[in-house]
Amino acid sequence: MRRTDVGMHDRADGRERGSAVVDFVLVGVLVVALLLAVLQVAVYVHLRNVIVASAQQGARYAANADVPVEAGAGRTLEIVGRATSAQTAAGLACESVQEVDGTGLTLVVVRCVGEVPSLFAPLGDLLPLSATGRAVEEAP
């Protein structure tokens, strides 16, 4: 092997030196972004399930014969606050109304609208969320 061949081989390796760090950073950023996206979906699904269940519970509470219909929204926000946080409950707007369905039954309907907080704070609240709970009102 001649001396010039060895030197040429060394220079080619020298250009590749440090590329593993760049590859690691690029792949690491993608993996972290993917992880945050999966966590955001998990948070969204969890909060949606909690709010839907709370709206249903609020509607069942307001459907009782001795409870005013307007109490359903307050009960829903109370349950959401206990299940998640007061901040999440404060970010929801809930209303409780009476409706009559197609069969003539009187229903108590609790509707909640809000946004899911983002895991990446600078993006703010991006994902809208709405939930509805219904219950048949008891006769007095």
Image: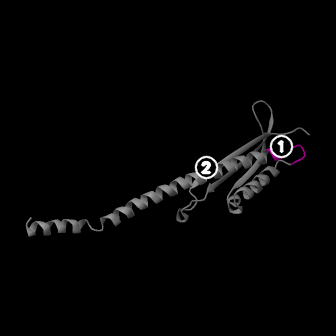
Q: Position of residue 53 (x, y in %)?
A: 72, 47
Mark 2 is on which residue type?
Val
Label 1 with label 2: CB-CB less than 8 Å: no
What span is colored magenta in the figure?
Answer: 60-67
Q: Position of residue 73 (x, y in %)?
A: 77, 52
- Report which residue position mark 1 lands on: 63
Determine if residue 91 is in view.
Answer: yes
Occupied quadrant, residue 109 = top right
- The majority secondary structure of the magenta stretch comes to loop
Horizontal side of 97 relative to 18 (left or right) equals right
Q: Residue furthest top?
A: 103
Label number found at residue 112: none
Mark 1 is on which residue type?
Ala
Q: Nearer the viewer, residue 70 or 84?
A: 84
Label whose residue precedes the other's in the sequence (1 or 2): 2
Q: Position of residue 111 (x, y in %)?
A: 71, 48
- Categorize mark 1 by other alpha carbons within 10 Å: few (<14), some (14-19), many (20+): many
- Categorize mark 2 by other alpha carbons within 10 Å: few (<14), some (14-19), many (20+): some
Occupied quadrant, residue 90 = bottom right
Label 1 vs label 2: CA separation?
27 Å
Occupied quadrant, residue 81 = bottom right
Label 1 sits on a secondary structure element that is loop
Q: Nearer the viewer, residue 13 or 31?
A: 13
- Residue drawn 42% across and 58% down? 30
Q: As displayed, is residue 98 above or below residue 92?
A: above
- Report which residue position mark 2 lands on: 45
- Residue drawn 42% across and 61% down? 28
Q: Is residue 127 magenta?
A: no
Determine if residue 110 is in view.
Answer: no
Looking at the rendered image, the quarter that the N terminus falls into is bottom left
